[in-house]
Amino acid sequence: MIIDLRSDTVTRPTPGMRDAMFSAEVGDDVFGEDPTVKKLEEKCASLLGMEAAVFCPSGTMTNQIGIKILTQPYDEVICYKGAHIYKYEGGGLAGNSNIGTKLLKGDRGRISVEEIAPVIGNINDVHQARTSVVALENTVVREAGSYYTLEQIKKISEFSRSKGMAMHLDGARLFNALTETKENPVEFGKYFDTISICLSKGLGTPVGSVLVCKKELELKARRIRKVFGGGMRQAGFLAAAGIYALDHHIHRLKEDHAKAKTLGNTLQQLPWVKSVMPVDTNIVIFEVADGLTPEKCLASLASHQIKALAFSATEIRLVTHLDFTDDMLQHTVSVFRKMNF
């Protein structure tokens, strides 16, 4: 038995999801003729209170498209210093959109109006870049799945738009956040111009993300998807998995969160662990004790058939997901308690 806690992207399709994929009605999506893709896009747009959506292969692509269609070369985007769009997308902001970044510290990655206001470029000063987008991430992957409330988002959005800036949301794990806040996802459409949601993380599909956007941005988004090489043909087989996940896997995310909290609570009690970030959703990040390295800990875990991820020179990340069972949780906790360095 291999227990893989490196990411919630490692899941396999469930039997029900496989059946949905197998029986999907398909067509050529680049020609706009795949009915299942259309159904997924309409479902996502309606779910988030927006008018249009574009199905893409990955969350990196949906993020990069979202930023590109909201900016011009030489603009800049404001985001958290550890934001996925900046730190984990291969320099795409610079390469794909030819823009700069204003990086903020945030409260566990959650930036605020008070941080945003002083760094907005002066539009009347030719020496400064035009600050055109504020990008939020929910949940914040680098900060152990911390999340925004809708009230926090509303305040940032209203201020940013009053300054002429658009709003993008990297909502790769948005439904993890909503599981905790219990807020209505349809409200999010009021506060963003583009929203990226990932179906292949906590929701458990094998492939796919969706960029939800205003109707007037849809054609531009599809054009950029084509330029980026994201045009897929009979993509309905993948879209069917997304529809199934939205119908069946959102409600069970609370199980992943509970397991993550159990792992976090266990790690806090161990002598080889220096500290554990607060566990808000399904991500656990902990720092190993002084004199110990993540690599040594990972080797010990691997000897017990447990996979995890080195997240920095001192940190390890664990992510719970639908393939991480109760028996696997108990085994992992037992291994943690037996480890000795």
Image: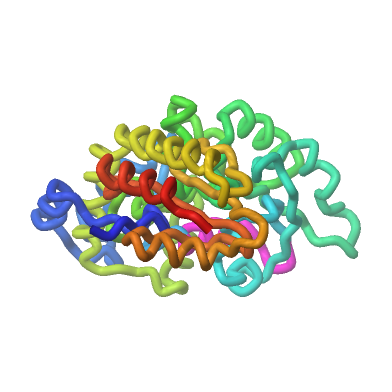
Q: Which one is in front, 323 or 300?
A: 300
Q: Which one is in front, 11 or 93?
A: 11
Q: How is the image coloured?
A: rainbow
Determine whether, in the image, residue 19 is placed left or right of residue 48.
left
In this rendering, the count of numbered labels is 0
Residue 224 drawn above or below residue 173 = below
Q: Residue at x 45, y 54 (%)?
A: 339
x then y, percent, for residue 281: 47, 38
Q: Which one is in front, 285 or 223?
A: 285
Does the magenta run of residues contain 63? yes
Determine whether, in the image, residue 97 is placed left or right of residue 226.
right
Mark yes or no: residue 215 visible.
Answer: no
Q: Residue at x 31, y 47 (%)?
A: 331
When asked about the image quadrant of residue 23, the answer is bottom left
Quarter of the figure that contains the N terminus = bottom left
Q: Residue at x 36, y 58 (%)?
A: 306
Query: Which stretch is magenta?
Result: 60-75
x then y, percent, for residue 168: 58, 48
Determine whether, in the image, residue 34 is placed left or right of residue 96.
left
Q: Which one is in front, 204 or 4?
A: 4
Residue 34 drawn above or below residue 188 = below
Mark yes or no: residue 214 visible.
Answer: yes
Does the magenta run of residues contain 103? no
When asked about the image quadrant of residue 67, the answer is bottom right
x then y, percent, for residue 136: 61, 46
Q: Residue at x 57, y 47 (%)?
A: 271
x then y, percent, for residue 321: 34, 47
When asked about the image quadrant of residue 5, the answer is bottom left
